[in-house]
Image: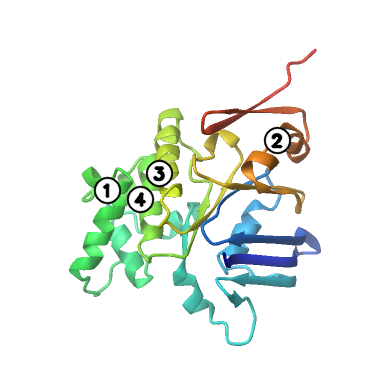
Amino acid sequence: MSDVLELVDVSVVRDGRALVEDVSWSVKEGERWVILGPNGAGKTTLLNLASSYLFPSTGTATILGDQLGGVGTDVFELRPRIGMAGVAMADKLPKRQTVLQTVLTAAYGMTATWNENYEAVDEERARAFLDRLGMTEYLGRRFGTLSEGERKRTLIARAMMTDPELLLLDEPAAGLDLGGREDLVRRLGRLARDPYAPSMIMVTHHVEEIPPGFTHVLMIRQGKILAAGPMETELSSRNLSRCFGLPLIVEHTGDRYTAHGLPLS
């Protein structure tokens, strides 16, 4: 399998502070990674590197075969090959657009409709992705009127519109109630198990939000990787305790994970 993402000795420094430091990490085709860590650990920085919107201060970052900052690399050609769903994208989208329009505009790399003419195949694809995420009943609803869960599902459908080779999910379950979280995790699990789905990287704070079908985990703390590898070996109580800085127990039941602290003595 070829590398979809490869970071070699990457550091990102801002105002004299290393957001991530000496990070080496690779994601291969077909893998589904979750990035875990406390606030300020560097999770979003890694995701921004993977999206090509952030360049390393030192080291090399190669995405889908193109090295950031390398000769011949055009990030404007690279970025349509990467799907991104997160709060940052939601803030850029017009609230008055319908759900269908919100997803369709991704076909042209735009956030708002202008004078473009969409082909029938574009609308069919948009409707299919929205149906897959349980949004068929909401096609005509305005994006700004959606619940948090409905908005998250719309963003994921939008990220899939360009047929990306890499799908990035920035805390997709953040802000959802229990029912909304479980619905989204179930749908993401179905997507993760699809052999034709792109490679995936998801950022979260909670092991309970890891969808079934995700294969690998990376744990980061204070900008440095503590563990990275297959879920079954690296998502351990020891590693999670080191990552969050307090004693934690990880439990694996069926195809889901939970974590809790030790009782006070």
Q: CA distance from mark 2 to mark 3?
A: 24 Å
Where 109 sits versus 19, above or below? Answer: below
Which numbered disc covers residue 131? 1
- Image quadrant holding the C terminus, namely top right
* Foreground tag (1 vs 2): 2
Disc 1 vs disc 2: Cβ atoms closer than 8 Å?
A: no
Residue 249 figure quarter: top right
Which numbered disc covers residue 190? 3
Disc 4 vs disc 3: Cβ atoms closer than 8 Å?
A: no
Q: CA distance from mark 4 to mark 3?
A: 16 Å
Q: Residue at x 25, y 66 (%)?
A: 122
Task: Give the mark nearer the N terminus: 1 vs 2.
Answer: 1
Most distant residue in the left direction: 120
Hey, what amino acid is under mark 3? Arg
Task: Give the mark nearer the N terminus: 4 vs 3.
Answer: 4
Which numbered disc covers residue 236? 2
Of the pair 160 and 152, the residue shown nearer to us: 160
Q: Quick one: SS at disc 1?
A: helix
Of the pair 14 and 245, the residue shown nearer to us: 245
Which numbered disc covers residue 154? 4
Q: Residue at x 31, y 44 (%)?
A: 145
Q: Quick one: SS at disc 4?
A: helix
* Foreground tag (1 vs 3): 3
Hey, what amino acid is under mark 2? Ser
Query: Is 157 situated left or right of 78 in this image?
Result: left
